[in-house]
Amino acid sequence: MGALHDGHRALLERARRDSATVVATIFVNPKQFNNAADLVAYPRTEERDLAMCAEAGVDLVFMPPGDEVYPPDFDTVVRVGRLATKLEGEHRPGHFDGVATVVAILFSLAGAERAYFGQKDAQQLQVVRRMAQDLGIGTEVVACPTVRDPDGLAISSRNVRLTPDERAAAPVLSRALRAGEAAWLAGERSGDALREAMLTVLRSEPLAEPEYVSAADPVTFDELTQVGGPVLLSMAVRFGAIRLIDNLPLG
């Protein structure tokens, strides 16, 4: 969605290593915002974005206007089922409908063999994979590791909107995830205990307002009572007006 950062750069560079031709699509998608103010405030840095694409060796940048993606008589919604109702889907109604719809359009227009998505948006990654599979879209969805700042904060376009105090507090997300990981490595397999380990760290930061903390199946996103296999630790936390998400897959 533009406002490209080092996380996006990593996706572009991975695509460049894998592919003969690289296309970047940049589009601030209004249909995945359930808060109009958030859409207005979303950073737009087109000149910098184009420069980053050029530096990464991108062959073509597709940056369509809104009415090219959604013409005036547009009347179709792509809706993924249960997978999109948990976690982010529960807290941001309609968000994944907007994601699935625009990605289906962009996959169709770009006709790419592969598309690269960051693991930071783990649920989005699975929603897009399910959408492509169910609709018979041949684009392979490739997951790439989360890119972090040196203090552990997952890089996000929203980070630039944090106040200095909020930015200083925000690495509590990664510390909370590591606390859950430490409990898991020590043999803890209770989902409630893993969630509590993360919440304890989040509660230590006065500026952090947890929206959800999860220890879930990494494919279905069902919350786990007992962890018998892989688990995805994830959370959404607010710092004032800014909402950040992060996750850590284990197992």
Image: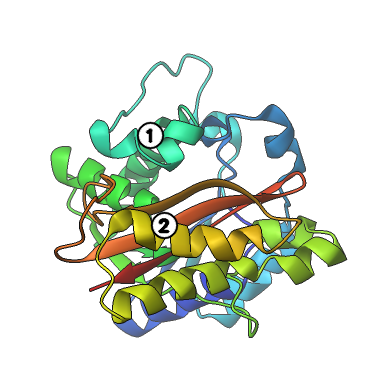
* Horizontal relation, residue 131 to residue 49: left or right: left
Q: Position of residue 149 (x, y in %)?
A: 63, 79
Q: Which label is found at residue 195?
A: 2
* Label 1 environment density (alpha carbons within 10 Å; few <14, some 14–19, many ≥20): many
Q: With respect to residue 21, does 25 lie above or below?
A: above
Which residue is more in the foreground, 125 or 244?
Answer: 244
Q: With respect to residue 221, does 186 lie above or below?
A: below
The residue sitting at 24% across, 66% down in the picture is 189
Q: Position of residue 168 (x, y in %)?
A: 77, 71
Q: Does label 1 or label 2 sit earlier along the sequence?
A: 1
Which residue is more in the foreground, 236 or 119?
Answer: 236
Q: Mark 1–mark 2 contact, CB under 8 Å? A: no
The residue sitting at 33% across, 37% down in the picture is 84
- Label 2 element class: helix
* Label 2 environment density (alpha carbons within 10 Å; few <14, some 14–19, many ≥20): many
Q: Which label is found at residue 101?
A: 1
Q: Amino acid at mark 1?
A: Thr
Q: Quadrant for residue 108, please give it.
A: top left
Task: Residue 121: tell me if it is visible.
Answer: no
Q: Position of residue 250 (x, y in %)?
A: 29, 72
Which residue is more in the foreground, 49 or 71?
Answer: 49
